[in-house]
Each structure stands twice: as structure tokens, then as C-alpha cells.
Image: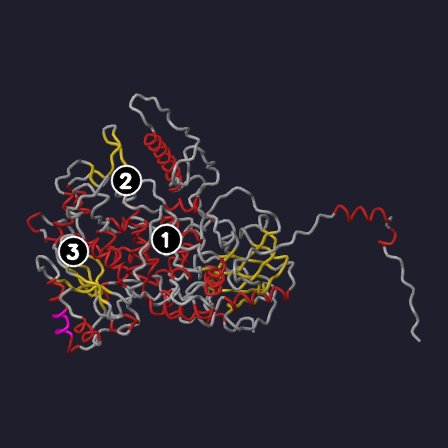
């Protein structure tokens, strides 16, 4: 028999009952933290009492809440309600503390007590309880969570879930397939093919013959035709189904020649100059014995397409530009300097490190090479063939930049999106491999598209009135690569896209014949991600475009570009202020021509080469914002794209400073001008009998500017990082007293998996 020991009264037993009841009534209700899920999204794992680190120096501003892993994102839900003051873009599909799983570069766990750390991959075991989780993101964020009060097993499970779901085994497992299937059936009538919510303008997708026909007519390429020999991808799996070829080349000849090109990629027309010269891209010819014969056939056909039968110039980009591994290496270095390493006190040392990364050197190299090709097309009236082994990487960058310099259409928002669609998406850039969405092969990863966007930003920085879109737009476009909900950046080719979407349509019971851009839309429909108000941040208030209004001698006039040769519009324009700068003989020496950079002194006019004369002539006249644009190309002209590389860095964030301050004032001014123009249009009666409309009334049509003149916006939240914020998006830390910069030094990626392979065992 067991004796029952009498229980002694506890301290709680002596409390008066009324006091206990009072305590219960004054306790605040526990807030239920629930994630905001989109269609098809499910919670995989979660852990409560997690601390999100805001600052490395102090935990005073850290946020407490719940960390959740879904099949789409990592989400943190703060316990306390966020402040109502809006200081950044509000994404319709992602919350302020959300990270898409495809945006994760590395998932790192650590236990300071045991001195353990590990980079987690898919289906890996974790033999210690993590006290910390650090997420290194492809958009350069570093997010840090601590599990001080969280359950150790729950913390471990959520870390493993994040690592597993961020490494999908197959393309079809990316969340976009589940989401778009649900979204299509939920609302069949909401989407318009490739449209934007801006006045019904459409982005050309180039997936049908009519799209190419319109481009041929727009550029006046009368000696070129749409060819359909690659329908159903019977010739090449990496080319689009419809391509443009010289009229003089028969389909049968193209089929015969195709077997000698890498991946059967026959020459692909890109663009035509008004003078008749053409820009063409193609892959290498595999058979050395056939090279001369095929070159002759291709060159002859392109020559016949030119009104003056001008020469054809072939540029081998593999021999003259850095390869994809060089570009990746430079990006890793510049990312290390900008984001991982703390800012150096000495600015000189920091700038030297940026220079030594070679990123800006490569940006300059691509711009310089593109400008050289512009000379052949515009200055020599010669057609140009861009050749690269596979025609899917360097050619994409250079062909796009050449067209951007020559054709003002591509400097409008819709035109730029059409350019990306034509020269990147349909031309077969390997977005799946280069972005490494499936995290299978780091050797194939390379930020070619980001390099292109940086080159575009360099031109925007030098000619701010020539582009309809803003650097915020370029940054958002780069971020969209890591959101797997749109078809634009998910695939290696249009054939891969078509095949996967056909299989996807069958699985999701989507009617046969439905447009792929309807049930799995491209990124160009920005209403999927942002409100109409936020999309106005894409609009450049300084843009001088076709149809842009200007005031001349007190009269409102509309600018229209003439049909003259792009460069000929510059003839006869004089003035002491050229390209916005005072130009003298010395300044021409400094930035006159590309070739002169290689010489210690500027050549006298009598010794000038034709290319030197072309560039000197162009830079000696005022730049036509709707004509040919050539960037300044000395190393000192290359700048770091701060909004992209430094937007998350607290030390680089300038309150009430940076380009946004000028953008804010200009937007308000343009908005006020547009209000006045609207009032003038509505004014009737020569005798002034009709009153002007009330300024407080809404204008007909959408207001284009983010900052309105009629409702001044408080500027307290404006920083150099706007419309982004570094708060909580970059939290560096030290491991056991060692600076993280040293810990990560020399790693090919954020952390060296090889170095840490045996940790935590």
C-alpha cells in the first residue's frame, strides 16, 4: 500500500479569490497571428515567439512574432501592429516581412552556445537546435531571426522546412504553377493578354507572326520577312517559333544551313535602322569546313536586304567581352563589398574595392562595345551580325543596348518591355539556369539580366529625360525575377515554356486553345503586383517622349520626332552648352571618342579615324532625347547603381536625401502642369463665359505622377532608399567575435558549403 502524502498549501492558495479574478480580467487578449495567404498557398510549418533582428548593434527595435514557412514564401508576422505611415512600395502578393522561397540564396542556421553553424540544403538533417536563422536573399537582403524564446524542436522544423521548400526538385513544383491554376479558374475574365493598366497599351509578346510583322513595319525593314520554319520547334528548341529572315533566303536553304549552327540557331533578325542597315544575331558555326560557305550565303542575303547593298560586319562577342563566369565572379565581389562587409570609414578604400570587383569595368565594356556597333549601323550604314557561341547570353545584352541607344521607342515603358520580351525571353536566354531557380548548378548561374539593367541605369543616369521609366521600375523588374508567379523569368526558352504550360493546362483542366498569356501571364501586367497608385512610381516626370507636351513662346506644343535619320537630326545644332555641359577643346579630348581612350593624347583632326570623327561629331552637339544616344564611357563616368546595391544598407540610407528629393518636387510640378493643361482643354468660349473646372475635382484619366500637387505628401519618410526601406532587411552579425566579412571571405556564394560541410556534425 502506498501512503498518500498530504499536499501543502501553495502561495496561490492564500490569495483572495477576488484578486485572482481581477488578474484574469485585466490580461490582454492574445493576438492570433495568421498569415495572409494567396490562392493555392498553404502553411507548411511555423514557430511562435521568434525575434526578427532589426539592428546588429541593439535588440531594442527587434520585432517579436511568428515565423511561417508556406509553399510560396517565408513570412514573419509581428505581434505588434505596424505603423500606418507608408514608406515603401506595397506589394499586393507579398507582405512587408515576406520573402519568396525562390529569392533565397542560402539558409544558414547557427547555435552560438555550441559554436555550430550550417548551410541547409534540401532533405538535410540538423543535429543541433538552432538559436538563429539567417536568410541570404538574391535581392541582396540579409534577414536574421533568433529563437531565444521559441521551442527548440519547432525552430528546427521550420528551418528544415524553409531549406527544403526553397530547393524544388522540379520546375513544376515552383509555386507559380499552383497559384496560376487556382487564379485562372477563380477569375477567367480578369486578365488581358500582356496588358498594362496604362490607357490600354500593350506589351508585344512576339509569340505570333503578327507581332513580328508590326515590328518589321515599324522599323521599315521591307526586305525582311516572317519565317515559320521553326513552328512546333522542329528546327531549334531554343529559337522562337517565328523569326525574321532576309526575303532573299528561302525556307529550304535555311533548313539546310541550320544543321551547321550551334543548337540549329540560324541567324535571327533584331532590328532595322532607317538607313536600311540591319542588326542580326546568330550562334557559332560548328563545322569549320562549312564556315566560309555559310558566311558567304548569310552575308550575301543580308547585303541584298540593304538599299545601298552596304557591307556586313561580323562581331564575335566571345572574343571581346567577359564570359558568364567572369560576370558572376564580379557580382559576388561587389555584393560582398556593398552588403556583407560593413562600410569602411575610408571612402577611398571602399571605392577602390568597388573598382577592384570589376563589376563597373564589365558594365563599361558592354556599353562601349554596344556603342562601337552603333557606329557601324549609324555612322557607316553597315549591317552588323552579333555572333556568340550559343547566341543566348552576351548577344542578349549587346543587341538590347544597341537598340536602346538607337531607337527611342525602346526608351518608353511599353517599348522597353517589348525589347526585353524580344531579345531575352523569346530569343531563349536561359533564365532558369542563369537565375538558378532550382539551385542545381551554381556554375550556370550568372546575373546577365542584372548587368543589362545596370547598363540601362548608367544611360538613364546620364540622360534622365530620355527614358519614360525610372530606376525604381528597373529595381522592381530585377526583383520580379525572384517571384515565381509569372512566366517571363521562369524558363530557358519559349519551347520549354510552351511545353510546361501545355502540361500545366492539362493538369489544371484549362480549356484547349486558351492563350498561355491568359492562364500563366507574363510579368508585364504590373496590376498583379502593385496598385495603380504605386505603379505611377515607374513614370519619369522628366521624360521628353513622342507626344510629350512642352511650352514654347507661351504656347503649348507637342513634340514629334521627324522621320529623318536619327543622327542627322543632330546636324546644325550649336551652342556653348552641349549635352548639358560646357564643351571646349579640352573636354572633347577627354570624352570625344571611344578610340581616343587608348591614346595618350587626342589625335589631331587630320589623323582622326572615321569612328573617332563620328563620336567627336556626336558629342560636339546637343543630345536629342528622341534620337541617337551614346553614353559617356570613361571609367569616371561609370557610377554604382545605389538604389539597387545599397537600398538595404542602413549606413547608406540618407534621410530626406538622394534622387528621390528631386523626383518628389518634379512629380508635383508635372502634376500641376497636367492639371492646368486639363483645365485648358475643358475651357470653352472665346469670351471667357465658361468658368474653369474646380481643381479639386478628379481629372479625366489616370494621374501619372506618384506625388500630387493638389495633396502635398509629407516628406519625413523619404530617404535615398525610397521606395524601399533598409529597416529589418539587412542585419549583419558576428560569429563568436569574428566579423561576418571574415567568416564569408573568399566564398563563391554567400557561405561556402564546403567549408561548413562538417560543422554541426
Helix or strand or loop: what does disc 1 sit on? loop
Label 2 Cα crowd, 10 Å radius (few <14 / some 14-19 / many 20+): few
Q: In this view, does 708 lie above or below 456?
A: above
Residue range in magenta is 291-297
Alpha carbon separation for disc pair 2 and 1: 22 Å
Residue drawn at 46 percent across, 37 percent down: 715
- Report the front residue among 517 and 483: 517
**Would you identify the image quadrant in which residue 682 lies?**
top left
Judged left or right of residue 50, residue 599 is left
- Report the front residue among 98 and 36: 36
**Would you identify the image quadrant in which residue 522 lies?**
bottom left
Residue drawn at 19 percent across, 77 percent down: 287
Residue 89 part of the magenta-drawn span = no
Say which residue label 2 marks. Answer: 548
- Closer to us: mark 2 or mark 1? 1
Say which residue label 1 marks. Answer: 195
The mark found on residue 727 in the picture is none
Alpha carbon separation for disc pair 2 and 3: 28 Å
The mark found on residue 377 in the picture is 3
Q: In this view, does 50 lie above or below 347?
A: below
Judged left or right of residue 406, residue 148 is right
Amino acid at each position: 500500500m502506498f501512503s498518500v502524502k498530504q499536499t501543502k498549501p501553495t502561495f496561490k492558495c492564500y490569495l483572495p479569490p477576488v484578486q485572482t479574478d481581477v488578474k484574469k480580467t485585466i490580461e490582454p487578449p492574445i493576438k492570433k497571428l495568421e498569415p495572409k495567404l494567396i490562392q493555392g498557398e498553404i502553411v507548411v510549418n511555423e514557430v511562435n515567439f521568434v525575434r526578427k533582428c532589426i539592428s546588429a548593434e541593439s535588440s531594442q527595435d527587434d520585432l517579436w512574432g511568428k515565423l511561417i514557412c508556406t509553399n510560396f514564401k517565408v513570412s514573419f508576422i509581428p505581434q505588434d501592429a505596424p505603423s500606418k505611415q507608408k514608406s515603401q512600395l506595397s506589394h499586393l502578393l507579398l507582405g512587408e516581412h515576406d520573402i519568396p522561397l525562390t529569392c533565397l540564396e542560402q539558409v544558414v542556421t547557427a547555435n552560438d552556445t555550441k559554436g555550430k553553424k550550417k548551410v541547409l540544403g534540401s532533405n538535410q538533417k540538423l543535429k543541433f537546435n538552432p538559436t538563429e536563422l539567417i536568410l541570404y536573399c538574391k535581392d541582396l537582403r540579409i534577414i536574421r531571426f533568433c529563437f531565444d524564446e521559441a521551442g527548440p524542436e519547432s525552430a528546427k522544423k521550420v528551418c528544415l522546412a524553409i531549406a527544403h521548400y526553397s530547393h524544388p526538385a522540379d520546375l513544376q513544383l515552383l509555386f507559380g504553377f499552383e497559384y496560376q491554376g487556382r487564379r485562372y479558374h477563380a477569375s477567367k475574365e480578369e486578365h488581358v493578354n500582356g496588358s498594362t493598366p496604362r490607357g490600354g497599351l500593350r506589351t508585344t509578346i512576339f509569340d505570333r507572326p503578327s507581332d513580328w510583322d508590326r515590328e518589321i513595319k515599324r522599323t521599315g525593314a521591307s526586305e525582311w520577312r516572317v519565317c515559320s520554319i521553326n513552328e512546333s520547334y522542329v528546327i531549334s528548341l531554343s529559337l522562337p517559333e517565328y523569326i525574321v529572315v532576309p526575303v532573299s533566303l528561302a525556307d529550304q536553304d535555311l533548313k539546310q544551313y541550320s544543321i551547321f549552327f550551334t543548337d540549329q540557331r540560324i541567324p535571327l533578325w533584331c532590328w532595322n535602322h532607317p538607313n536600311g542597315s540591319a542588326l542580326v544575331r546568330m550562334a557559332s558555326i560548328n563545322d569549320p569546313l562549312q564556315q566560309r560557305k555559310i558566311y558567304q550565303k548569310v552575308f550575301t542575303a543580308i547585303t541584298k536586304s540593304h538599299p545601298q547593298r552596304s557591307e556586313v560586319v561580323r562581331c564575335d562577342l566571345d572574343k571581346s567581352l567577359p564570359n558568364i563566369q567572369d560576370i558572376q565572379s564580379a557580382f559576388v565581389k561587389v555584393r560582398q563589398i556593398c552588403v556583407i562587409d560593413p562600410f569602411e570609414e575610408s571612402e577611398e578604400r571602399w571605392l577602390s574595392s568597388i573598382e577592384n570587383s570589376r563589376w563597373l569595368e564589365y558594365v563599361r565594356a558592354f556599353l562601349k562595345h554596344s556603342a562601337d556597333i552603333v557606329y557601324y549601323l549609324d555612322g557607316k550604314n553597315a549591317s552588323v551580325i552579333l555572333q556568340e557561341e550559343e547566341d543566348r547570353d552576351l548577344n542578349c545584352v549587346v543587341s538590347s543596348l544597341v537598340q536602346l541607344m538607337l531607337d527611342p521607342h525602346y526608351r518608353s515603358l511599353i517599348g522597353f518591355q517589348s525589347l526585353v520580351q524580344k531579345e531575352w525571353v523569346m530569343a531563349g536566354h536561359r533564365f532558369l539556369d542563369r537565375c538558378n531557380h532550382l539551385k542545381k548548378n551554381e556554375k550556370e548561374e550568372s546575373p546577365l539580366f542584372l548587368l543589362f539593367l545596370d547598363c540601362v541605369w548608367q544611360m538613364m543616369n546620364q540622360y534622365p529625360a530620355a527614358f519614360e521609366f525610372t530606376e525604381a521600375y528597373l529595381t522592381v523588374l530585377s526583383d520580379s525575377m525572384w517571384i515565381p508567379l509569372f512566366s517571363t523569368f521562369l524558363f530557358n526558352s519559349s519551347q520549354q515554356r510552351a511545353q510546361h504550360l501545355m502540361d500545366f493546362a492539362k493538369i489544371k483542366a484549362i480549356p484547349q486553345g486558351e492563350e498561355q498569356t491568359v492562364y500563366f501571364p507574363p510579368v508585364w501586367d504590373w496590376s498583379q503586383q502593385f496598385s495603380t497608385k504605386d505603379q505611377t512610381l515607374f513614370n519619369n516626370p522628366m521624360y521628353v517622349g513622342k507626344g510629350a507636351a512642352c511650352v514654347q513662346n507661351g504656347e503649348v506644343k507637342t513634340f514629334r520626332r521627324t522621320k529623318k535619320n536619327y543622327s542627322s537630326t543632330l546636324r546644325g545644332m550649336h551652342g556653348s552648352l552641349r549635352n548639358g555641359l560646357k564643351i571646349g577643346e579640352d573636354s572633347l579630348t577627354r570624352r570625344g571618342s571611344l578610340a581616343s581612350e587608348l591614346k595618350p593624347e587626342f589625335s589631331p583632326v587630320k589623323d582622326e579615324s572615321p569612328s573617332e570623327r563620328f563620336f567627336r561629331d556626336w558629342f560636339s552637339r546637343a543630345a536629342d532625347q528622341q534620337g541617337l544616344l551614346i553614353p559617356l564611357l570613361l571609367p569616371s563616368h561609370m557610377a554604382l547603381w545605389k538604389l539597387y546595391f545599397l537600398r538595404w544598407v542602413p549606413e547608406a540610407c540618407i534621410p530626406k536625401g538622394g534622387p528621390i528629393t528631386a523626383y518628389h518636387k518634379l512629380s508635383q510640378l508635372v502634376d500641376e502642369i497636367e492639371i492646368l493643361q486639363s483645365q485648358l482643354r475643358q475651357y470653352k468660349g472665346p469670351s471667357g463665359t465658361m468658368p474653369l473646372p474646380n481643381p479639386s475635382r478628379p481629372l479625366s484619366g489616370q494621374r501619372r505622377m506618384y506625388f500630387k500637387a493638389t495633396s502635398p505628401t509629407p516628406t519625413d519618410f523619404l530617404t535615398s532608399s525610397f521606395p524601399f526601406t533598409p529597416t529589418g532587411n539587412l542585419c549583419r552579425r558576428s560569429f563568436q567575435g569574428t566579423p561576418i566579412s571574415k567568416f564569408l571571405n573568399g566564398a563563391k556564394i554567400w557561405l561556402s558549403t564546403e567549408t561548413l560541410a562538417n560543422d554541426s556534425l
